Image: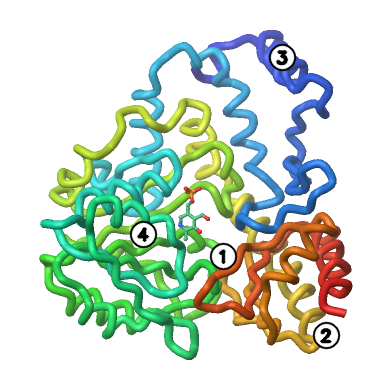
Amino acid sequence: MSTASISRRRFAQLLGASAAYAAGKPALSLAREPIVPIATGSVVRLSSNENPFGPSARALRAITEAFELACRYPDDEADMLIEALAQTDGVQSDQILLGAGSGEILKICATAFTGRSEGTLVVADPTFEAILGHASRRGAEVVKVPLTSSFSHDLPKMAAAAKGGLIYVCNPNNPTASLTPRNEVREFISRTPRATAILVDEAYHHYVDSPDYESVVPLIRDHPNLIVARTFSKIYGMAGMRCGYCIAQPATMERLRPHQLSDSVNIMALVAARASLGDPEQLAHGRRLNNETRLFVTGELDSLGYRTIPSQANFIMADLKRPVVPIIKTMKDRKVQVGRLFPALPNHMRATIGKKAEMEAFLSAFRAATA
Ligand SMILES: Cc1ncc(COP(=O)(O)O)c(C=O)c1O
């Protein structure tokens, strides 16, 4: 439904309805400043790399306007988002597949390309682990290749370990927030045999400002085995809405589509995602606040003697020079939730960059836990 198809009065009623629905919670604000607090109750949540500033004001308005569409299946809205993404990313609409978060995309890729007969899954260690479980449940061998000493993917070793199947490259990498340099990624993609699929997860793409990085979306044109995953959960602030997508050549899409659940992305997420794409402020604002706050926190940690891996994302990984598990627990007792243990880096702590006040709470809990 367009804004034109509802009266101003009706629009005001819908806004009111959303406020009433919030039952006791603050009315839905369309202001630019903090909309969705990352702190849940009195807990400061820095454990899941969410964007504490929430969705674009345009996205919130689109959701409100779409209330009346909730009784309809979302196919038209899905088509419109796909068109908008195709324009934004410079590809054709038959090269885009939507998912309920990029988590669904990862599952679809593991299902299509890994298994007893399809082949291995090769991943870095540590990396974002969701895809490992999907591949193992299909009976695929999972090979973990340690990151290099500069925390980039060891792509030659990963390529050598692949037996058909799928190689998963997370760039920037979660949990280390580090990059794999663009020249290495290019060379790896050009050398990998086409029988092996490559999934590059660009969940944190919008936060990167290093000249050593590039998105590999433009390489899809020449590489039928390349798939790129993106999400609206990070800089677009929509983790709770569940919307992600991937881009690949049309023939690759045909291998993925049979594993997709039809209409898995709900209509509110679809309209919010499309509205976000039309709001350049969302990206500029997200990057600026993330950079400022990340600089503040890493500076403070540095002055306490703790180094962080140079971060190109909305989280940091700090070397505590001692086991992280007791520190995680003490910080939790002080109502600050940070990332879990990553067994490959047992002395490192991952923390999401929240709002400045949240990072002040983080630092005070951290000082107490490490005293
Ligand atoms: C690298 C990476 N990929 C994918 C995801 C999944 O995100 P979502 O399913 O919310 O799109 C995450 C979430 O933290 C992530 O860090």
Kind of residue at disc 2: Leu
Kind of residue at disc 3: Ala
Cβ of mark 4 under 8 A from ligand 1? no
**For the residue carrying disc 2, how many other residues have a C-alpha within 10 Å: few (<14), some (14-19), or many (20+)?**
few
* The furthest residue to the front: 326
Rounded to the nearest whole Å, what is the CA distance between mark 1 and mark 4? 25 Å
Rounded to the nearest whole Å, what is the CA distance between mark 3 and mark 1? 35 Å
Is residue 94 toward the left or the right of residue 60 in the image? Answer: left
Closer mark to the observer between disc 3 and disc 4 = 4
Closer mark to the observer between disc 2 and disc 4 = 4
Is residue 33 toward the left or the right of residue 134 in the image? Answer: right
Which is more N-terminal, label 1 or label 3?
A: 3
Location of mark 2 (residue): 304
Q: Residue at x 54, y 20 (%)?
A: 66
Which is more N-terminal, label 1 or label 2?
A: 1
Location of mark 1 (residue): 207
Location of mark 3 (residue): 17
* Residue 132: image tag: 4
> Helix, strand or loop at disc 3?
helix
> Helix, strand or loop at disc 2?
loop
Q: Position of residue 23 (x, y in %)?
A: 79, 19
Q: Position of residue 272 (x, y in %)?
A: 54, 34
Q: Is residue 192 above or below residue 154?
A: above
Task: Tell me the quarter of the image containing the C terminus.
Answer: bottom right
Q: Position of residue 254 (x, y in %)?
A: 16, 43
> Helix, strand or loop at disc 1?
helix
Kind of residue at disc 1: Tyr
Rounded to the nearest whole Å, what is the CA distance between mark 2 and mark 1? 26 Å
> Helix, strand or loop at disc 4?
helix
Which is more N-terminal, label 2 or label 3?
A: 3
Kind of residue at disc 4: Leu
